[in-house]
Amino acid sequence: MSRIEVRIVQTLMSRKPNQWGILFGGTLILLSSLLSLRAWEDEALFQWAMSSRDLVFQQGQYYRLITAIFLHGDLGHLLSNSYMLLVLSIFVFGTLGISNRGSFVLLLYSFLGAVAVQAMTLMSYPAQVGLLGASGWVYLLAGFWFFNYLWIDRRRKFFNRWIRVIGVSLVILFPTTFEENVSYLAHLYGFIVGALFALGYFITMRSRVRQFEEVQILNEEFLPEEPLD
């Protein structure tokens, strides 16, 4: 007798990323670098770009929800976020965007999500606490990617995918040391918003996502455990 096994060998997330991922990631890094490097030499510019609950919500300077995302406190802060932004941009915009238009749509929605994360974080802090950096955006993209990996990349069993997500998250997202000047709340909000975005993406795009699956049919010969009558 023979047994037929259908195995998924390729999915949307296993295909080669398009050019938009590295282009978007590079652009975000360039904007962050230009603003941060200039602001480090110009205190007035630094104060203009940073955000706090008082400045944004009490004084109505809402532009700071955007400028503060691209402003970083020092070179180490800029480099760590830049590295993760580039990698996750390639994965998210270059792969899950599906088409050129889709990549732009994901960029827009993730940016709006990053602004929302910035606002949520500020509302959770005292009025005078400053907030800057793209960490919320980074964790949003990470949450978006990880949860879509769980639902889309069916080349492996769900349990194995879950273990991979936990392992990678602990390595690249969980801090080895805790620092007072790091907003871990922004990380948490970003990851949660990214997970919610991933759910919405999968629900609306599920049928199209499944079209990228390629299967391999295996025909295995085997002997029955007991003789047939």
Image: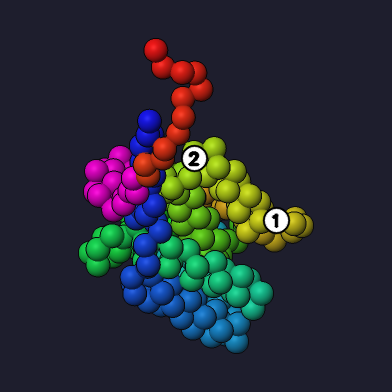
- In the picture, the quarter occupied by the C terminus is top left
Which secondary structure dominates the residues rendered in magenta? helix
Mark whose residue sits in front, 1 or 2: 2
Q: Secondary structure at mark 2?
A: loop
Asked whether 91 or 176 is in front, the reply is: 91
Place of residue 79 in the rendered image (x, y in percent of width and height, measured from the top left): 60, 75
Q: Which residue is mark 2?
A: 157
Residue bearing mark 1: 175
Q: Is residue 99 or residue 114 the one in the foreground? A: 99
Q: Amino acid at mark 1?
A: Pro
Q: What label does residue 101 carry, if any?
A: none
Residue 119 in the image, given as x and y percentages of width and height? 47, 52
Horizontal side, residue 170 vs residue 197: left or right: right
Residue 53 location (% of width, % of height): 53, 54
Identity of the residue furthest to the right in this view: 177
Quadrant holding the N terminus: top left
**Residue at the image point whose x is 54% and y is 79% from the top:** 36
Residue at figure coordinates x 30%, y 64% from the top left? 103
| Coloring basis for residues | rainbow
Mark 1 or mark 2, earlier in chain? 2
Q: Which contiguous range is marked in magenta?
A: 197-217
Disc 1 element: loop
Instruction: Return the x and y of residue 221 as percentages of the image width and height.
Output: 42, 38
Question: Would you identify the image quadrant in which residue 98 lies?
Answer: bottom left
Which residue lies at the image location 63% right of the left edge and 49% below the top edge? 167
Q: Is residue 66 above or below residue 109?
A: below
Q: Is residue 8 magenta?
A: no
Would you say residue 199 sits in the magenta stretch? yes
Label 2 crowd (10 A; few <14 / some 14-19 / many >=20): few
Q: Type of residue at label 2?
A: Lys
> Looking at the image, which residue is at 56% across and 48% down?
165
In whole angstroms, how far apart are the C-alphas of marks 1 and 2?
28 Å
